[in-house]
Amino acid sequence: MDTNPAWRSHVIQAQVDRCLAFEDHIVRLRRREYASELPPIILDFLEKASGHVRRRLRHLLREPEFTVLSDSEAQTEIGRYLDFYQGMYLAASLVERVGAGDGLVELYMPLRRILTRALGEETDLLLLPIPSVNYSLQPVGEGLRKVAKGVDIAPATLSMLPGSIYAVGFPGLQSAHFVGQCLLAHEVGHAMYARYKLADVLLPLVQKDEEHLGELARSIATAMPDDMAIGEVRIKALLSTAITRAVERWVKEIACDIIGYALLGPAFLMSALHFLPLWGPLDDSTEYPPNRMRLHLLFDLLDDSGIRYRRVRAFLKTWRDAVSFKKIEWGTPLDQLAGEAIMTVSPQISRVTLEQVKDRVGVFDYRDRVDHIHALVERMRQGIPPNEVVTATGPIPASFPCVMNAGWFSLLDDLGAIRREHGWSEKEAKDKMNAWVAKAVELREIQTRWQEVQ
Amino acid sequence: MLSERDFSELSNSLAAGFDLDKIVRTLAHIVSTRSIRLEDRMRLTAAKGLLDEIRRGERWLDSGNFDAHSAQDALAFDRAAGALSMAPLTTEEFNGAISRLETTIDSLVADRLPGEEEISEARSFYGRLARRTLQESHRIVSGPAHGEGPTVATWTQIQPGAAT
């Protein structure tokens, strides 16, 4: 057996040094002030986890099981600690970015309310800007626990973390476009998708096209040059992995779109229309389904007959026509197999997903709140944050979905009029209107909390 | 740059990797001491579970359906196919190798010591799987953050009309 204790000792010491540097970093981060209790809790956990791993590394050379490993096996195990450390460093960087000050603090409470209503009180989030034009949700608590168990961290340390922690990322450069942040409802959808185990009920709806999969496997084998032959098992393995992964991911993304729509209604669709086409041709697909497919399914959910605003209706009609004027041009046969199998059952996917959301958190139907939304749009026209609706019994805080829908409707329908009235440039007018919506979300939150403590 | 989007994939890959490291340690210890501890048998139950996933993944294309586990099973199959041999394998050869591994692990879980060659074969297989998961997490940490699907997604463009 090839063993080189001196080499092992050297590499282990290098890993220990990384842990110590990481713990110094945590000490620096802990000196900052944070708006919620969660960041310091995560930092404490990371410091304890790092200390545990550091002690474990120092002990490795004395462990009988470790000493009988070959150098190659030992290298693999030690190498794993480097990636463990990188994961912890990433978790610390999420906390670091929470305090970056790029806005959206107004959205923290409404998102937290949705998450706790959907997943329970022991749920919290880090809302952070990311240096990318994208949104994301990371189950940080679950990920840390999973990895921590791998290195046998004590249950007492694991229990330091709240039940569920999510890092919700938004594009830092777009934080001023407040109404566009409705896409965060899709990210909330990811948390609900996992917690409600929607994969268990949605994936079996998709039927495998065995005939075409078989043809595809044969065509790959035939097309492969002799000197690149990898054998039937590898082709089968790669094909199985690719198709199951595509279907798993695409069904999840579509279900999260449906959840986003269920939570926020047309405002979610309008945010999607504002954001998704940025990514290029509507038919392109990567780890995400083609945008034509996603938007098509969202338009299937929209009944716009209750929308009173001419320009909003025209905007939606333009997009509905653009999305549906032709069939999806699939990029690869594999995309086609996955996409067509999903499209065939998309009505069932929508129905089942909506039922799950309705049973647990309720579905927002803008048609039930047309009058409220209209009153809020009127406030926007007067330059007043749309935070409350005056009823026969007095003013009541507007619901979060109503505020976001009113914001979108107003932005699309009244932007020109407001610009002219105030002599603002388009950017100035958009910034002001988004700021009114942000202020309304903040005010309605204060009003709601006031009502709760009365 | 390591993106926050990669955190889930990294934690999944690390968790799978740490489990595999423990299996490799266990097998190395058994080879070294020619004895099986109670804790070894518990760890090797996880090794057996992994072989079950590989089996389901191997059968999926011919007889499986989509469900919440099919992608995980297919990934286990793909990792195993890469770990078993550098040379192309037929389905028969692959299944034969998995059957031998099942027999070895079943014996160990039942507290029966198989031959040294069988344990070495199992140790070598799980060792290669462990390395593959390490390569995966390295790729997540250092590779392009997004947009790279499985290689087969590119291969299938060889004959774009094949599945129309």
Image: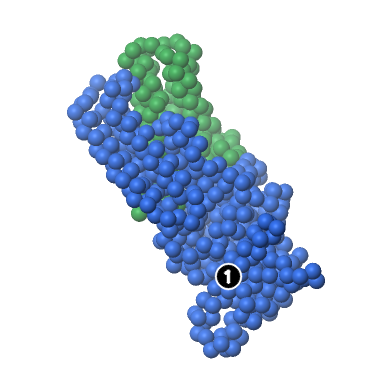
Chain colours: A blue, B green
| Residue on which the image places disc 1 | A439
- The quarter of the picture where the C terminus of chain A appears is bottom right
Work out whether residue B42 can be spotted. Answer: yes
For the point 58% across and 44% down, which residue is it?
A: A122
Residue A155 is situated, as x and y percent measured from the top left of the image, at 48, 31
Q: Residues within 10 Å of mark 1 (few under 14, many from 20)?
A: some
Query: Is residue B87 toward the left or the right of residue A394 in the image?
Result: left
Instruction: Please report the residue visible at 44 percent of the width from the left and 67 percent of the height from the top.
Output: A173
The image quadrant where one finds the N terminus of chain A is: top left
> Would you place residue A404 above or below residue A85 in this image?
below
State the residue lying farthest toward the right: A392
Q: Position of residue A129 (x, y in %)?
A: 45, 60
The residue that appears at 57% across and 47% down in the rendered structure is A123
SS category of the residue bearing label 1: helix
Q: Residue at x 50, y 53 (%)?
A: A36
Question: Taking B111 as reference, is A377 left or right?
Answer: right
Residue B65 found in image quarter: top right
Q: Tally the numbered discs.
A: 1
Specify the subunit that label 1 lies on: A
The reply, left or right, for residue A11 in relation to residue A203 is: left
Q: Is residue A407 above or below residue A365?
A: below
**Residue closer to the observer: A74 or B114:** A74
Q: Position of residue B130 (x, y in %)?
A: 37, 32
View extreme (front): residue:
A454
